[in-house]
Image: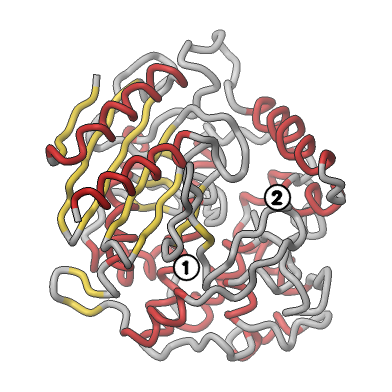
Amino acid sequence: MLHGHLHEDFRPLARLLERQILTHGGGAALCVYHRGEKVVDLWGGVATAQGEPWQASTLALSYSTGKGVLALLLHRLVNAGLLHYDDPVCQYWPEFAANGKATVTLRHLLCHEAGLYSIRAVTDDAHDMLDWSAMVQRLAAARPEHPPGQTWGYHALTLGWLLGHLAERATGHSLAALMHDWVTAPLALDGCYFGLPELESHRCADLLKTARPPHPGTSPWRSWWHETQKRGVHGLHQMIGFPTESIAAGLEPRGIQHFDFNSTAVRRACIPAANGIFTARSLARVYALFAEGGVWRGETLLHTRIIEQIQRVHHRGMGRVIAIPLHWRLGYHRVFSIGRQPTHAYGHFGYGGSGAWADPSRRLSLAMTVNCGSGTPMGDLRLPRLNACVLNLVNQRS
């Protein structure tokens, strides 16, 4: 069922991935780097509603997993001296100072401390998110939900426009050009997009509710996103007494039940916090850079001082929007695993089950892309189980 290759030491990981695809349906890809070597590169299952098989080149819309890739761009700009973590954002983007945001810094944004998590405050309908310029202008005029740095609230949807336009203003170049020049080209990535080019559309997997094709003329993803969000996220938060108002503000723009992530319009739009489209191979290589201390194929892309800043945990408590302590680094959260948690690992998981991360202490990175998942913002148990398996295998290998 699986295609690709892997090092013999990682065969149990392949068996686990195959069982997951059989159980959950759809398709998936998995890539692992260890000590700078690609030791796992596997894919399998179906990529489309018509049952077409997942290919080596298949791309998958990976939701919040893209935040970690976007963060790398900002770190590379800091590394080059074009940005600084503690400079006010308005130094580069003057309009952003409106309504009490003059002290918001890049560090605040990367740690989700800017107070700008409310997507409902800057949209009337989810389809507003398709307009990059309008979203940038609305966030520049927005008022924070709390003083910057006072607490944190997961900027589930807003972070992409905030970081992306800051990069544009600091350099004078478009986000697409910056991603190519500072991330995709230096790492020779084979699939990494915020806004899918028309020429690459044939490579993109469909998001599937189940492994079975939907009825003709229906979208398998529209209402399901909304239903699982309500059932899973709200149920968990209500059980522990977490205020659900901030959940809706951060995660649920009005009209999200009619927003089709499978549509051409959404795939081609630039919504970096939510519609990044990748191969697992590209995601694993991004995090292999972190696993190797900022050096890739002999070239230093991030200096040690930047890596040290990225790895430092800024807060461990519970904030707003999501009632899970995420131990934010600069743009990255803790890594969830079944059993013992990897202390030094960090990355970013996405809605539906995708995710990618690095563990510099083990010189390890892993990435998974999927097109059929449970629909919770932090993914489901597939990735934590794969994480536990690979950690065990690497510990044995050492």
Residue 81 x/y as whole percent: 40, 91
Residue 345 figure quarter: bottom left
Asked if the residue under mark 1 is in contact with the one under mark 2, i.e. CB atoms within 8 Å, the reply is no
- The quadrant in which the C terminus is found is bottom left
Q: Name the one closer to the observer, 384 or 294.
A: 384
Quadrant of res 317: bottom right
Judge left or right: residue 234 versus residue 271. right
**Nearer mark to the viewer, of 2 and 1:** 1
- Residue 9, disc: none
**Disc 2 residue crowd, few under 14, some 14–19, many 20+, Cα 10 Å:** some
In the rendering, at what x and y percent does residue 179 appear?
38, 65
Q: Is residue 193 left or right of residue 335?
A: left
Residue 35 position, x and y percent, is: 18, 61
Q: Residues within 10 Å of mark 1 (few under 14, many from 20)?
A: many
Residue under the point 81% across and 79% down: 147
Q: Amino acid at mark 1?
A: Ala
Write the residue at 52% across / 59% down. Answer: 334
Q: Which residue appears at 33% of the width and 28% of the height? A: 16
Return the residue at label 2: 128
- Measure how far apart labels 2 and 1 are at the Cα level: 23 Å
Name which residue lies at 52% across and 54% down: 270
Q: Residue 203: percent from the left, percent from the top?
A: 32, 35
Q: Please, what secondary structure does the residue beneath circle 1 have?
A: helix
Mark 2: secondary structure? helix
User: According to the image, label 1 marks what residue?
Assistant: 71
Q: Is residue 5 or residue 186 the one in the foreground?
A: 5
